[in-house]
Image (cartoon, helix red, strand yellow):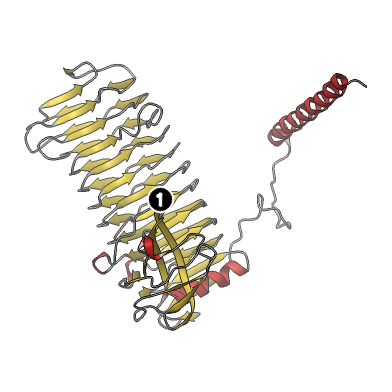
Amino acid sequence: MSQQRIISTQLSRRMWLGSSCSAFLSRAIIADDVTPQTKYPRATSGDDRSEPDWNERLTITVGHKDADLVGSTEKVIQAAVDSVARIGGGTVKVLPGIYRLRNAIALSSRVRIVGSGSDSVLIKEPSVVSTIRHDSDWFDQEITLQDDREFRVGDGICIRATNTDNNASIVLKRTLVARSGKRFKLDRPLRENIWQMGKPTASTLFPLLNGEHVSDILIDNIVLDGNKGNNENLDGNHAGCIFLQDCNRITMRNVEAREYNGDGLSWQICHDCVVEECHSHDHTGLGLHPGSGSQRSVMLRNTLERNDIGIFFCWGVRFGLAEKNRIQNNRTFGVSVGHRDTDNIIQNNEITGSGKAGIVFRPERGEGFSGDRNKIIDNKIIDSGLADGVGIDVQGYTSAIDIFRNELRETRGPEKRIGIRLGQHVGGVRIGENQIVGFSSEQVDLRTKTVRETVVSP
């Protein structure tokens, strides 16, 4: 057989395999629509798609007294979480009391953490910091501290240093699991070079509740206190009152998150998360931080006060909904949308007293990086910024934005304030039926250098 014939035969087989796989997938999709639905689900080994909605699962109570597990630190709550997770899920009921945390509580799949309202308070203990005394290589699992006096085995820590090759920041979260004097073993290897030339430090910084690669969790009816006056800053890419990374189907409901030196509630590359009727306030960072790559986040009826930004759509946050939130007195923006944050709906929110603008679309890096195809509908945006504040500020190359039926109101006098501003490079924006009152300029369009109000039909 000729070389050409062999190649032709191999290609034909590959094409046949490809078309066979495609046909199989098509049949599977069609079959899923027409096959009988499960009417009487049973618990079947390995079937996590269809299971009965059981009337009762295991509940373990945690409290200072008269509880299944008695204590007042993160250790007793962690023990309850681990016990419930071991049998496949259930509820940890946190009874009234103040629980002092020296490490994050690690969340587990299918575990509900339910507090007792304002009487259940998890508070972060004050942070301490030490320089790291000796070099540790990327494969090491230990560090040596200069000043170890306030560090204990079991503490959650944050190691920070500079990568001496590229000057990038290194941030690692670890737990101290053993010690000999100033030498501490870590729960996981470093996987980064922690060298003296990078000026490394270790601080007792961590989220209060931390979830990584977990799913199907409810956090409900509890208070989380970051104790920011006694703690260093750790930003929302690494921590917060609640920090989630690579998670699915997490619900945060009736949570009061307060006073974190960083973010309130932060979820990164997390999908189908719901944040409902939470109060996130007085953080140095963000009230709600739907983080990079998060799909279908739903934020309903929350109160977000006195943060740097109320809601911060990070990178590639898509198909989300922010509705009926009260967003008040945040230092820079009420809502911030940017890097490839597309196809989100921001509607029926009350945004008042923002430091610079009520809603901002960030300029980002240029064309192709903007937050497009978002809808801004039926919001009340009141008293935004200082004398040159803006109600809705659309910057960069943002396009395909709908801005309809919003009430933009300025009660402090017009000064140089603008209702809606469209930047020089902004693409198509549809604007109509907005009520804009009390501004120096209702609408400024820097593309055409006009000051006017544009009304079109939706």
Q: Which residue is found at the position 19% from the left and 23% from the top?
A: 444
| Residue 212 position within the rendered picture, expressed as x and y whole percent measured from the top left | 51, 57
| Residue 94 position within the rendered picture, expressed as x and y whole percent measured from the top left | 43, 71
Left or right for 265, reference 81: left
Placement of the N terminus among the 4 image quadrants: top right
> How many marks are shown on the rendered structure?
1
Q: Among all residues in the image, which is located at the extreme right?
A: 1
Please tell me whether residue 40 is drawn above or below residue 390 in the rendered image: below
Q: Which residue is found at the position 52% from the left and 66% from the top?
A: 91
Placement of the C terminus among the 4 image quadrants: top left
* Closest to the observer, 65 or 204: 204
| Residue 247 position within the rendered picture, expressed as x and y whole percent measured from the top left | 51, 52
Q: Residues within 10 Å of mark 1 (few under 14, many from 20)?
A: many
Residue 219 figure quarter: bottom left
Which amino acid, mark 1?
Val
Circle 1: element type: strand
Q: Is residue 52 visible?
A: yes
Please tell me whether residue 105 is drawn above or below residue 6 in the rendered image: below
Q: Is residue 97 visible?
A: no
Residue with the mark numbered 1: 275
* Closest to the observer, 257 or 245: 245
Left or right for 439, reference 1: left
Please tell me whether residue 174 is drawn above or below residue 385 in the rendered image: below
| Residue 263 position within the rendered picture, expressed as x and y whole percent measured from the top left | 33, 55
Left or right for 298, reference 191: left
Residue 384 figure quarter: top left
